[in-house]
Image: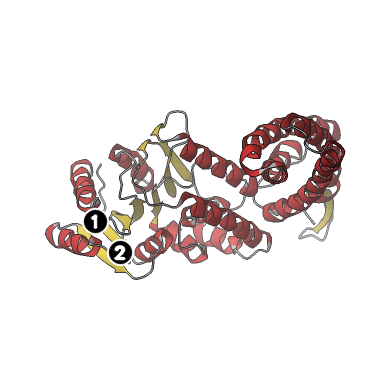
């Protein structure tokens, strides 16, 4: 891959913590590949997150031996902190990172970086969730990954498919505008950066990757999942309160938000809401049957209803009520969760009533009862979504010649 202009083109960061066993081999593999595949100036930076083993000594030795390798010692842990610090101080045109275990085949580097070097795209990410991706990993990690990304799509209305693949790149100008507004310093950093980029109208390029799970990974899946859930809630709240200065980012990057579209007719809304409701009910049943043996009836009902509620609100926002773009999205999801609370109270009460009457009902009886309660909750949900969450508001706009025009649009309160 060649490029005519001078200066450092690519800085590839490898964040590490206690990786003495794999660091040297991985860095040498990366350097050998970059040297063969790229004819533009590049640099590999080892960002050490306060390792306590022999990682520091190995990193310093590699930096002393290999001309285009540098070592950076950081006394604060967190992948997000390592990337923020290193990228913020880089003079490279394109900033990238990959995981030290090299789970992603290095052959994906040229298609990852080419759209950014050419100026076609602003961010580029590897995805393990497309049909043409080739992924080797256990069913537990696969389920967690797909569930997390489905929740992310529902809660924040994003379009990118895989938020947590450790294989990403961003143009330096986009990073300069976005990094000051990314709060997370750990694993949610990637997701938050991508959400802000999409809301800022940036073009995100996705490539399918060949990815093999590292069985020796030290990542705490449960803790990471909990932190990610908290991150989603925080970002939804920040967007709802207008804490993120999206207009300023639009202005700095020369982008603009998507324009809202007109909603379908009432009859069309009913049909579309019904279709979404059917899919949500099926999803609820599958999730309940999956979670109930592990967590019990009430916890399974709550978890299944919460997940389907987030996805249902996102689907109805776009498909049923024809609302696109980021405006009011966080607030509408918050209002949708209030509606969820009412639905949960209704279904939970029905479950309590069933147990009071029968005593020890089976999972099938519980499911039938909850499904019936969900039908009632669905009717209530449509009424509240239409009349409150996505209600049509009429606004009066005064033009430059003092003439008055009336526009009708769907928005949140």
Place of residue 352 in the rendered image (x, y in percent of width and height, measured from the top left): 82, 44
* Farthest-out residue, bottom: 75
Residue 347 versus residue 193: which sits nearer the camera?
A: 347
Place of residue 397 in the rendered image (x, y in percent of width and height, measured from the top left): 80, 57
Q: Is residue 218 left or right of residue 318?
A: left
Q: Residues within 10 Å of mark 2 (few under 14, many from 20)?
A: some
From the image, which quarter does the C terminus lie in?
bottom right
Count numbered badges in the picture: 2
Helix, strand or loop for disc 2: loop
Helix, strand or loop for disc 1: loop
- At a point 70% along the width and 32% down the height, the residue shown is 285
Residue matched to label 1: 20
Mark 1 to mark 2 CA distance (whole Å):
9 Å
- At a point 79% along the width and 36% down the height, the residue shown is 370
Residue matched to label 2: 51
Place of residue 213 in the rendered image (x, y in percent of width and height, measured from the top left): 37, 40
- At a point 20% along the width and 48% down the height, the residue shown is 25
Q: Answer yes or no: do the residues labelled 1 and 2 have beta carbons within 8 Å?
A: yes
Who comes first in sequence, dot 1 or dot 2? Answer: 1
Place of residue 311 in the rendered image (x, y in percent of width and height, measured from the top left): 67, 41
**Residue 362 in which image quadrant:** top right
Residue 399 versus residue 349: which sits nearer the camera?
A: 349
* Farthest-out residue, left: 65
In this rendering, the answer to whether 129 lies above or below 246 is above
């Amino acid at each position: 891959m060649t490029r005519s202009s001078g200066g450092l083109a690519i800085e590839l960061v490898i964040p590490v913590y206690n990786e003495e066993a794999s660091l040297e081999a991985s860095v040498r593999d990366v350097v050998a590949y970059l040297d063969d595949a790229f004819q533009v100036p590049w640099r590999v930076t080892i960002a050490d997150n306060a390792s306590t083993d022999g990682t520091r000594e190995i990193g310093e030795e590699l930096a002393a031996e290999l001309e285009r390798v540098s070592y950076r010692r950081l006394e604060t842990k967190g992948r997000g902190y390592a990337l923020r610090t290193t990228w913020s101080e880089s003079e490279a045109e394109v900033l990238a990172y990959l995981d030290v275990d090299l789970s992603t085949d290095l052959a994906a580097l040229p298609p990852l970086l080419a759209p950014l070097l050419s100026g076609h795209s602003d961010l580029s990410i590897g995805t393990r969730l497309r049909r043409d991706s080739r992924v080797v990993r256990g069913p537990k990690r696969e389920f967690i990954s797909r569930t997390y990304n489905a929740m992310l799509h529902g809660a924040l209305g994003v379009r990118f498919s895989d938020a947590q693949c450790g294989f990403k790149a961003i143009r330096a100008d986009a990073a300069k505008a976005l990094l000051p507004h990314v709060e997370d310093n750990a694993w949610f950093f990637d997701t938050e950066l991508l959400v802000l980029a999409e809301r800022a109208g940036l073009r995100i390029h996705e490539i399918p990757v060949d990815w093999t799970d590292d069985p020796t990974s030290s990542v705490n899946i449960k803790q990471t999942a909990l932190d990610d859930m908290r991150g989603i809630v925080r970002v939804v709240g920040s967007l709802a309160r207008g804490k993120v200065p999206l207009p300023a980012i639009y202005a700095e990057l020369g982008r603009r938000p998507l324009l809202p579209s007109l909603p379908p007719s009432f009859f069309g809304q009913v049909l579309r809401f019904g279709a979404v409701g059917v899919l949500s009910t099926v999803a609820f049943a599958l999730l309940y049957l999956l979670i109930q043996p592990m967590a019990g009836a009430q916890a399974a009902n709550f978890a299944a209803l919460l997940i389907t509620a987030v996805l249902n609100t996102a689907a109805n926002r776009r498909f049923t009520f024809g609302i696109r773009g980021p405006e009011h999205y966080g607030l509408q999801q918050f209002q949708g969760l209030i509606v969820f609370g009412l639905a949960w109270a209704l279904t939970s009460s029905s479950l309590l009533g069933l147990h009071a009457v029968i005593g020890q009902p089976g999972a099938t009886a519980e499911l039938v009862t909850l499904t019936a309660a969900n039908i009632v909750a669905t009717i209530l949900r449509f009424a509240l979504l239409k009349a409150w969450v996505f209600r049509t508001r009429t606004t009066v706009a005064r033009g430059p010649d003092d003439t008055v025009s009336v526009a009708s649009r769907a928005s949140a309160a």
